[in-house]
Amino acid sequence: MNIIILGAGRVGESVAESLVSEQNDITVIDMDPARLRLLEDRLDLRGVVGNGIQPSVLREAGAQDADMVIACAANDESNLVVCKVAHDIFNVPSTIARLRSPEFVEGDELLGKNGFAVDHVICPEESVTRYIHQLISYPEALQVLEFADGRASLIAMRAAYGGALVGHTIGEFRERFPHAEMRVVALYRLDTEMEATKTTRILAGDEVFVLADTRKIRYVLGAIHNIDKPVQRLMIAGGGKVGLRLARSLVGQCEVKIIERDKKRCEYLASQLPSNMLILHGDGADEDLLLEENVGQMDLFLALTSDDEDNIMSAMLAKRLGAGRVMSLINRRAYADMMQGSTIDIAISPAQTVIGELLTHLRRGDVAAVHSLRRGAAEALEGIARGDVKTSKLVGRRVEEVKLPTGTRIGAIVRGEGRKSEVLMPHHDTVIEADDHIIIFIPNKRLVREVEKLFQVGATFFG
């Protein structure tokens, strides 16, 4: 695809990096020539210096031949205008805008073709807040991702000493917990993927990816990890956009303390949040302040400032001072990779939480959801089987007959709608039916295109 990205900031850079790796033709527009030069040196893309809302700049970027424009500049106004110009002047088929304001909702008339012509909205702050919320709900997990409108979930967790799975093979685990209907779709040991067969033995420290019916997650988590106590006391370092969104969403759910170094921002936070949420003016990496506020009694410490180094330092300090679990917001990919598996329990990458939403709009075939795993190296894809035996590569075929690329595997099939739906852990002889939601684990992004083709329906289906 020919894709134009407006903005070479953190989100734009991460989006470009992800899309370039999939052999798309990428052009990035930004006002800063030095930033573009760095991107061009590192990635196989073209940079265009200028203001993307100007038609002449979009023309230079090749908007007349573009399949998609992704506007992720720093401000909403630029992103809205770029989508409008791209659609009205250059007839770009698909437009995506990063919009921070909650007042612009995808599907609103204002964003329609007669308005700003925005097909899809992405909001990194909202995505990160949702992501953190899932981790608060399931404190045993490293990652929780939903498929088929929340009916199935993919959970990543670290096998813990004392857990029922450690020391046993996957096959033995199924025998010991027959009611824990789940499928181990991937297993990583010391950052190396291991083959997940019924004879594979799980060791403490292994990173296990499990697909299960969302209604049975608690049971599955308890069988693998031992259930942690619910998060009741939480401390947030950083009262910016993400910190405030998260605090608002936790009202009435748990005890929250926020540390913010900007005094005016503290006053604003106090005006926006209930009086029982404590707003502290100070530095999240101040040891005396953390001790004074009993950080050691916190179930969870979250470092959510806009500075990676500050987040890393404050999270590591909080862990050393006794906080139960610590998470850190880390924008730079190199830092996030380095911190994964360190004293920081979970390194949250804002860009990676957004990439999944973007990839869903880029995928071909009837793809309903895409989630990026292991910092972008692997993917979990949900597609819908359409057509019939003649027109589909899936419908009417047993799982063993589906020609999957080497290493990919079907993890679950969600059949039916609403309350009547069921989450199946398919066997080799399970027959795929029309409208089944099929969740496939893809260990390497290079295999995505082959998987997408499985969901593309032959022409006769439409005839």
Image (cartoon, helix red, strand yellow):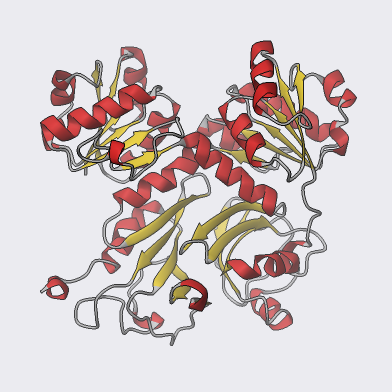
User: Image check: 164 left or right of 206?
Assistant: right
The quarter of the rendered structure image containing the C terminus is bottom left
Q: In the image, residue 412 lies at what x, y percent?
A: 49, 72
Q: Horizontally, is 261 left or right of 411 in the view? A: right
Residue 88 in percent (x, y) is at: 14, 32
- Determine the residue located farthest toward the bottom in the rendered image: 429
Can you say whether 112 is above or below 306 in the image? below
The quarter of the picture where residue 8 lies is top left
Q: Residue at x 24, y 15 (%)?
A: 50
Residue in view at x 30 percent, y 80 percent: 395
Looking at the picture, tell me which residue is in the foreground, 392 or 195.
392
Q: Can see residue 281?
A: yes
- Left or right of residue 357, residue 288 in this image: right
Q: Residue at x 70, y 22 (%)?
A: 270
Residue placed most toward the observer, 42 or 294: 294
- Whole-percent x and y of residue 371? 46, 52
Q: Eyeballing the image, is 145 above or below 436?
A: above
Q: Which one is nearer the viewer's eye here, 52 or 402?
A: 52
Relative image position of residue 279 (x, y in whole percent): 75, 24
Tell me the quadrant of the picture where the N terminus can be found.
top left
Residue 8 in view of the camera = no
Tell whether 24 sits left or right of 161: left
- Quarter occupied by residue 456: bottom left
Q: Is residue 205 above or below residue 198?
A: above
Could you tell me which residue is drawn at 46 percent across and 64 percent down? Answer: 148
